[in-house]
């Protein structure tokens, strides 16, 4: 009995640690840009945090960043896993980080990019995660209600793309209306039962899951199914930031 109790305790402890994974480090982008990142990751691999930039004039800029841990075997990362993170100016995307994570929680083989510009991550060192700070704040009940969106510019001279998501909570259910333009269009308007701060859904062969935070909504596919009545390769996958 004691052996089984210890095993259960170890599994519970592992789940707690997975739900509280945190990364904190500083380094340089290219040779000239000094930055710091503080990130929190839940057991589904969803990540929220902040990038701090230290300007040469002494000013400091802080930018929210959201994303997730994905398998990246086909991208050449040393352990097959990498963080894919996007910076946001309000609800507009303004930069992307992609990097692997080593055993110390430090980035490897990483870079920041936006359109044609790309900078390698250099000179990283571990820092202390800020005390009392929580970047992941699961929404429940009426805190779910709101409008969320994201937008991005595809490239110079081309139209903006993005998506919108409206949520309304009622008696343990969420009524949601989601639309993305990539520029092909995907739309979904349904009601789902909430499981904590999550809900699941499907449209034809496409299945998806959503996590609702007080500051954003993350929707991702749980299979590789396609939707015939959406535009080619269009999905509702994405991170929608609360307005």
Image: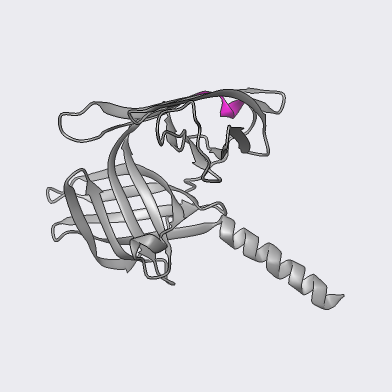
Pick out the residue farthest to the bottom: 3
The number of callouts visible is: 0
Q: Point out the image quarter for the C terminus.
A: top left
Residue 41 as seen in the image, left or right of residue 182: right
Residue 21 as seen in the image, left or right of residue 57: right
Q: Is residue 75 visible?
A: yes
Q: Which residues are magenta?
A: 142-146
Q: Quadrant of residue 144?
A: top right
Residue at figure coordinates x 61%, y 34% from the top left: 201
Relative image position of residue 74 (x, y in whole percent): 38, 61
Relative image position of residue 131 (x, y in whole percent): 46, 55
Relative image position of residue 171 (x, y in whole percent): 72, 24
Q: Main secondary structure of the magenta part?
A: helix
| Vertical placement of residue 241 versus 4, above or below | above
Relative image position of residue 140 (x, y in whole percent): 63, 33
Residue 133 as seen in the image, left or right of residue 59: right
Residue at figure coordinates x 26%, y 57% from the top left: 111
Residue nearest the viewer, comparing 213 with 199: 199
Residue at figure coordinates x 34%, y 44% from the top left: 86
Residue nearest the viewer, comparing 225 with 138: 225
Q: Point out the image quarter for the N terminus.
A: bottom right
Q: Is residue 167 visible?
A: no
| Vertical placement of residue 221 versus 29, above or below | above
Residue 5 on the magenta segment:
no
Residue 145 on the magenta segment:
yes
């Amino acid at each position: 009995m004691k052996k089984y109790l210890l095993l259960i305790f170890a599994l519970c402890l592992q789940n707690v640690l997975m739900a509280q994974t945190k990364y904190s480090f500083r380094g340089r982008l290219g040779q000239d840009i000094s930055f710091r990142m503080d990130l929190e990751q839940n057991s589904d691999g969803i990540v929220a945090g902040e990038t701090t930039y230290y300007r040469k004039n002494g000013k400091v800029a802080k930018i929210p960043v959201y994303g997730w841990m994905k398998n990246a075997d086909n991208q050449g990362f040393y352990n097959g896993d990498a963080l894919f993170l996007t910076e946001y100016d309000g609800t507009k995307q303004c930069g992307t980080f992609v990097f692997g994570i080593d055993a110390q929680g430090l980035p490897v083989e990483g870079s920041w990019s936006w359109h044609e510009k790309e900078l390698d991550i250099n000179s990283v060192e571990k820092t202390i995660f800020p005390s009392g700070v929580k970047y992941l704040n699961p929404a429940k009940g009426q805190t779910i209600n709101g409008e969320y969106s994201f937008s991005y510019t595809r490239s110079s001279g081309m139209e903006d793309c993005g998506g919108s998501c409206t949520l309304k909570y009622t008696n343990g259910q969420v009524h949601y209306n989601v639309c993305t333009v990539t520029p092909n269009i995907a739309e979904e308007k349904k009601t789902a039962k909430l499981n904590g701060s999550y809900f699941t859904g499907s449209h034809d062969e496409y299945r998806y899951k959503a996590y609702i935070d007080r500051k954003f909504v993350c929707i991702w596919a749980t299979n590789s199914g396609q939707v015939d009545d959406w535009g080619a390769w269009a999905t509702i996958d994405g991170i929608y930031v609360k307005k």
